[in-house]
Every structure is written in structure tokens, then in C-alpha cells.
Amino acid sequence: MTATQKGMFVDTSICTGCKACQVACKEWNQLPMEDQEAVHLGNAFLADSYDNTGHLSATNWRHVKFMEQFSDDRRTQSRWLMMSDSCKHCVDAGCLEVCPTGALFRTDFGAVDIHNDVCIGCRYCVGACPFGVISFNDKFDGTTGGPHMVKGTVNKCVLCSDRVANGLGTACAKACPTSSITFGNLDDLKRLAASRIQALHARGQTDAYVYGWDLKAEGYDRPSDGAQDLKVVGGLNVFYLLLDKPGVYGLPAHDPGLPQKNILPNAGGALLMAGVLGIAGVASFRKRRMDAAAPAAVE
């Protein structure tokens, strides 16, 4: 990574779930509502906590997750965890590796962007993303959606590449009232994350850790006790401070790696198994021939 690498640090400990980031993302990128009729009728509510989108999609590039934690009696203990989720712009991006046309590409500042006019809609990237970020747009085009809507192609957060290219930060970070989302140089963001971990651990909140990078291994000063950081897929340009296990936030609990890295080991295993089955088949065939020939020899 160089000093020009940009990204975002999402501190979930100070997220209020206001969804200003969702609105800013929608407005700046001119993303349509998935079900406009339901919204106009007032029945688009999911009835699932205060979550109003449910998941990331081709038209929802940012999604504020709500996790409600209660004791069995729902009185003695309660906690709400909230996280503003989006594309992680992975250092080792599986979507980039499987794209056959180069529609997905790496920008100069490290984000993973999309050339929609080059995308053929094969959806290999959808299956290759371990975070379920990329979605296929089969509904909207430039007339019913916005400039990013090309029917039959994939869509996701592009880290506001148009804004960043002109010296601006991301729309979501600009709108966040608590600085839960911070845009900047990746090295600066890691230092900020390390200082936040130190502050939280100092006041006894030792369950706080960074998801996306191992700050200690990277040489940043962060406590060695308590919850430990987790580096995944080579590092995340959009990384998180979490207060519970990754699975609680719908994230992989271990480094998911890249699906395509399993091709060679699996192919080797398949070849080995084919060899074993072939030898077993030859041995079985030979045994049957010998058994059939045995009576004739006795006569």
C-alpha cells in the first residue's frame, strides 16, 4: 500500500443508526428505490428492527444494519449494535480476479470500480465476493434509475470515485453526523483506528477490535490484551471497529480467502481421487477375470 491509497474507517461504537449515510449515497449516486410503489403506499417497512433495506443490492450501495441484543427476560440487559455496511474494496478482491472482461477494475486510489458498459452480466463476481456485496441489476436502466443503472449489469459501492477524483471525500462520510464513517488516507485511518481501540480498551471495553487489518502486526500501537484484530482477504480498504464477533454483524468469522484459490488444491484432489478410483477399477476388473478363469483351470 502507498500513501495514495484511500479508504474508510467505520467505527460502529459511535454509529447512531440515523441512516444519513444511506440517504447521502442514494442522493449523490441517483440510485432508485427498489420498490417505488410500496414506498408511495407506505407499506415498504420490513418490520425487522429499524432496518429499512434489509441488505445491500444493486440500488442500495450502503446498508445500516441493526443488531438488537437482549437478555432472556429482555429487562436486565440490552444492547443495540449498528453498522453502516458497504463494499469493502478488498486488497485481494475476488471479484477482480474472476471478471472476464475487465469491467471491474482498481482505481489509482485503491477502490474497486465498475465499467458498466463493459460488464456482460455473467455474474461471476457475485459468487466470488465473500461478503455478498455485488448485486445484479435486472430491473433499472438509465431512464428509470440513474446514470449508474445499466440493466443486465452488476452494481455496488464504488467509493464515490467521481468525488474522490476531484479531491472530495465520500458522500456517506460527509453526511455522517458522529464521524462513525471517516474517509482519508489508509495509513491515517489505521492510526485513527488504533487510537480508538486504545481509548475503548482503557475504559474497560476490551471487546473492541478492528475487522479488516491486524494493526499490531502492521506496527500500529494498540493493546495486546482483549479482543484481537482480524485481517481478511489481504486487508480491507473499508474496514471496521466492531464490538462483538464478526458473525453478529453478518461478516465471515475467519479469513474467507478467495474462492478461486481453492481451484488448484481441489483440482489436485480430484485428479488424485480419479487415480485411486482408476487403480481400484483395474484391480476389481482383474479380480473378476481371475475368479472367472479359476473354475476352467480346475476342470
Image (cartoon, grey):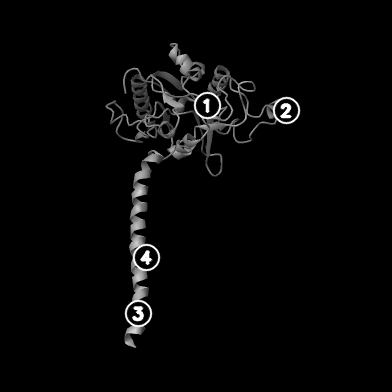
Comparing 110 with 205, the one in front is 110
* Amino acid type of the residue tagged 2 in the rendering: Leu
Secondary-structure class at tag 1: loop
Toward the top, the furthest residue is: 166
**Of labels 1 and 3, the one closer to you:** 3
* Amino acid type of the residue tagged 4 in the rendering: Gly
Secondary-structure class at tag 2: helix
Distance, label 4 to label 1, CA atoms, is 55 Å
Distance, label 1 to label 3, CA atoms, is 73 Å
Q: Which residue is mark 1?
A: 62
The image shows residue 60, relative to residue 3, as above or below, that is: below
**Residue 149: x percent and y percent?**
57, 24
Secondary-structure class at tag 4: helix
* Amino acid type of the residue tagged 1 in the rendering: Arg
284 on left or right of 217: right
* Amino acid type of the residue tagged 3 in the rendering: Ala
Category of crowding for the residue at label 4, using alpha-carbon neighbours closer than 10 angstroms: few (below 14), some (14–19), many (at least 20): few
Distance, label 2 to label 1, CA atoms, is 23 Å
**Of labels 3 and 4, the one closer to you:** 3
Secondary-structure class at tag 3: helix
Q: Which residue is mark 2?
A: 41
Q: Which residue is mark 3?
A: 293
* For the residues bearing labels 4 and 2, Cβ distance under 8 angstroms: no
Q: Which residue is mark 4?
A: 281
- Can see residue 249? no
Considering only order in the chain, which callout, 3 or 1, is on the residue closer to the N terminus?
1
**Of labels 3 and 2, the one closer to you:** 3
Category of crowding for the residue at label 2, using alpha-carbon neighbours closer than 10 angstroms: few (below 14), some (14–19), many (at least 20): few
